Image (cartoon, rainbow, N blue to C red):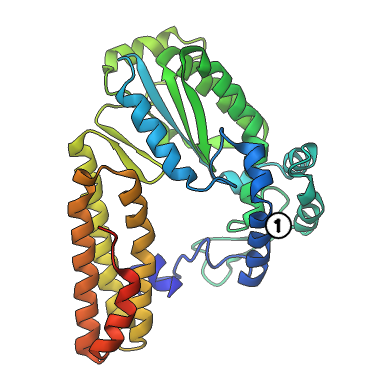
Amino acid sequence: MVTTVKDAHVGVGVPDVRPLGVGGRFRCALLKFAVADARESLKKRFWPHQVAVGVSGGPDLLVHAVRETMGNAPPNWVTIKIDAKNMFNTLHRGEILEEVDAHPLTRQFTAVMRAEFLPKSPIFLAGAGDNVLADFKSEEGGQQGNPLISMAACAVIHPHVVEADEALCQSGGFARFQADDGYLVGRVDLALEAFHTLKAGLKTKGCELAPHKCIVYGPGMTAAELDDAKAAASWDCDDGVLPLRRSGIEVSGTPVGESRYVHDWLEAKVEKCRAKAAAICGCLQSNNRHALLTTLRLSTQCYLDHWLRTCFPTDVKWAAREFDKIITDAYECATVAGITKDEAKKTARAARWPF
């Protein structure tokens, strides 16, 4: 089921099952429970600057904060979207242990983090044929899909996020992160300086930013005005870095901006869901029809539920109907293939969309 969801090209190459299929599911489940048990402590540690750990509905809060602020901001305000490149695998292990042990609210994880980092991590080489295992091992970063690494990464970058937030507060702005995705909101000059300081700080911890994924969202700003702000900055901003987007921006998996941008963004997701449903039906229909129905629901409902909570009803209602039609057609396909009507309805009850 995981393989089908993650790779629509059935039978071509090795399916990508990260992060669900990495590190042993029983081990990951135990670590996830440990992090969940410390939820309140972690919320006190990271809130309000970070919403990925310990904060119920954190991504939703982040979307509303950015959208409402930018919707009422002066023309010289921007949101700089930050994407940390492969952060979980590149942070220095020494920095991780130091930051986790430095605060009483995360110190309870120090012993297990040391145990996690004791063995060196094997390196697998993509496209290497049968020789996928490298003859060297990694002594930096953590394993993808490990809940402890997500928490520990938040601890490592937290001082730098707080520093950026304090700088942006001068104009009433803020800095917020969800794991390796960050948003700097405020006056353009302050936002550019905060970006430069944050980038330099994260680099000392082993984390580089992905330049092609870092953008400036400024609905009231022209490209010339942004270029002037870059030229006036205290650091040398290379050409092509931080391009301007005026129509919209993706915030925590939700489109924020003009109605046309939101519609086009959701339309692309609907088409992706349609293609995924076709791939799942083609792979599982004749093998396990119950798995087909369950996989369709689990691979789409979490996204739609998020959009229903974070998008305006007028923007997302049509997309919800399209999602419903895709799932309904898949149920009909499975029923024709041999599942009884009662069996299909029983599985369908769990996938009924909250219109």
Residue sitting nearer the eye, 230 or 331: 331
Q: Quadrant of the N terminus?
A: bottom left
Q: Is residue 290 above or below residue 188?
A: below
Give me the residue at 21% from left, 68% from top: 326
Q: Is residue 183 above or below residue 298?
A: above
Left or right relative to 93: residue 145: left
Residue, disc 1: 137
Amino acid carrying mark 1 in the image:
Lys
The residue at the far top in this view is 232
Q: Secondary structure at mark 1?
A: strand
Left or right relative to 89: residue 333: left
| Total labels drawn | 1
Give me the residue at 31% from left, 51% from top: 308
Q: Position of residue 99 (x, y in %)?
A: 74, 38
Give me the residue at 80% from left, 53% from top: 114
Q: Is residue 117 at all visible to an observer of this figure? A: yes
Left or right relative to 81: residue 102: right
Q: Position of residue 290 (x, y in %)?
A: 36, 84
Q: Is residue 152 above or below residue 226?
A: below
Q: Quarter of the image holding residue 45?
A: top right
